[in-house]
Image (tube, grey):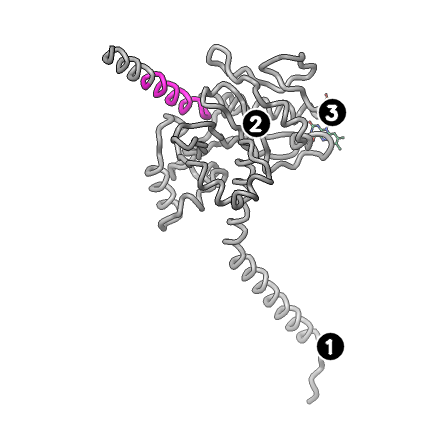
């Protein structure tokens, strides 16, 4: 009997086989390309860290590319946001347990993912409404801090990962500050989907340049904000983006949260205490010499 190619069962069979084949190709591509995607995402984040720290693309190119410059100039610490303590080992243990294998933290620790895990995995913390000023609902327990050291090993600047909601999107970026933890070096975003020309102007180099040398705290409280009708010369204010008050407020809230007690506040306090006790020790040393 001749095979009827146009019969209903045959049509279904061909469609099913085609679907299965396509699904296989797409999932194989997704699995095999995943490491490449992760590496590219990391390169992009590192390139943003370098850029917010003042490296020009030409300098990066000349000095051997993003990986080389980043690895030679930056130290990566993992800190417990609640206490401000170094928490590399705790983060490693929690990640290994959550993924049920030994995780390569430097390549695989995804803070956004960690912030959304179940709090009983020890990687995240639900935020109370009052504390959640930038609308992220839950926060990771451990965060990376990037420290750029001088050749003699002294910190020259600190880069903090920050994020918060704008009008349409979660804006993810980096805030670089001087070792006084008071003066901004720069702010940049590596991920945002605000409207181009309105909220998307957070990525405008002219607007980002306004952040340099702004001050963060007054009497220990975060005062730095994006302000509509900001006065020239205001050390604590950055001009709001016109027609984008919601995005502008999102950036203010983001700074407020991440520089405050629920963000890097405890870490910054620790570092400042450490600096002042080192200064006292060296003063005492000086007295002894006298
Ligand atoms: C299509 C469209 C896109 C918008 N995109 C943004 C945006 O990305 N960020 C923002 O804050 N406001 C955006 N707005 C404007 C807000 O709805 C709101 O009017 C504005 O934030 C108020 O800012 P203003 O007080 O500076 O006018 C957009 C409005 C429209 C109609």
Residue at the image point whose x is 59% and y is 30% from the top: 165
Question: Observer-nearest residue: 236 or 81?
Answer: 236
Residue at the image point whose x is 74% and y is 24% from the top: 243
As helix, strand or loop, the secondary structure at mark 2 comes to strand
Q: Which corner quadrant of the image does residue 214 belong to?
A: top right
Please identify, in this view, whether the residue under mark 2 or under mark 1 is nearer the observer. 2
First of labels 2, 1 by sequence position: 1
Question: Observer-nearest residue: 282 or 22?
Answer: 282
- Which of the labelled discs sits on residue 243, or is there none? 3
Measured from the top left, where is residue 97 in percent x and y? 35, 45
Q: Start and end of the magenta stretch?
A: 262-278
| Mark 3 residue's CB less than 8 Å from ligand 1 | yes
Please identify, in this view, whether the residue under mark 2 or under mark 3 is nearer the observer. 2
- Which of the labelled discs sits on residue 186, or is there none? 2
**Quarter of the image where the C terminus is located:** top left
- Which of the labelled discs sits on residue 6, or is there none? 1
Measured from the top left, where is residue 184 in percent x and y? 54, 22
């Amino acid at each position: 009997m001749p095979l009827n190619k146009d019969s209903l069962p045959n049509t279904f069979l061909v469609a099913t086989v085609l679907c299965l084949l396509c699904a296989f190709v797409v999932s194989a591509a997704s699995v095999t390309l995943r490491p490449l995607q992760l590496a590219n995402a990391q390169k992009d984040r590192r390139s943003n860290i370098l850029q917010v720290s003042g490296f020009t693309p030409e300098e990066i190119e000349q000095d051997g590319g993003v990986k080389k410059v980043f690895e030679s100039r930056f130290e990566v610490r993992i800190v417990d946001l609640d206490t401000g303590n170094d928490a590399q080992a705790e983060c490693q243990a929690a990640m290994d347990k959550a993924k049920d294998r030994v995780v390569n933290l430097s390549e695989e620790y995804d803070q956004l993912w960690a912030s959304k895990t179940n709090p009983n995995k020890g990687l995240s913390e639900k935020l109370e409404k009052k504390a959640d000023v930038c609308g992220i609902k839950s926060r990771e327990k451990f965060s990376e801090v990037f420290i750029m050291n001088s050749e003699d090993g002294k910190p020259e600047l600190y880069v903090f990962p920050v994020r918060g909601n704008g009008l349409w999107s979660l804006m993810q970026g980096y805030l670089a500050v001087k070792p006084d933890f008071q003066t901004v070096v720069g702010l940049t975003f590596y991920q945002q989907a605000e409207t181009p020309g309105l909220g998307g102007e957070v990525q405008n180099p002219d607007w980002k340049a306004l952040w340099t040398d702004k001050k963060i705290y007054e009497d220990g409280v975060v005062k730095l904000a994006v302000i509509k009708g900001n006065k020239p010369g205001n050390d604590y204010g950055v001009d709001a983006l016109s027609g984008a008050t919601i995005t502008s407020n999102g950036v203010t809230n983001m700074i407020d949260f991440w520089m405050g007690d629920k963000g890097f506040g405890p870490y910054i306090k620790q570092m400042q205490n450490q600096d002042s006790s080192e200064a006292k020790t060296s003063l005492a040393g000086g007295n002894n010499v006298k």
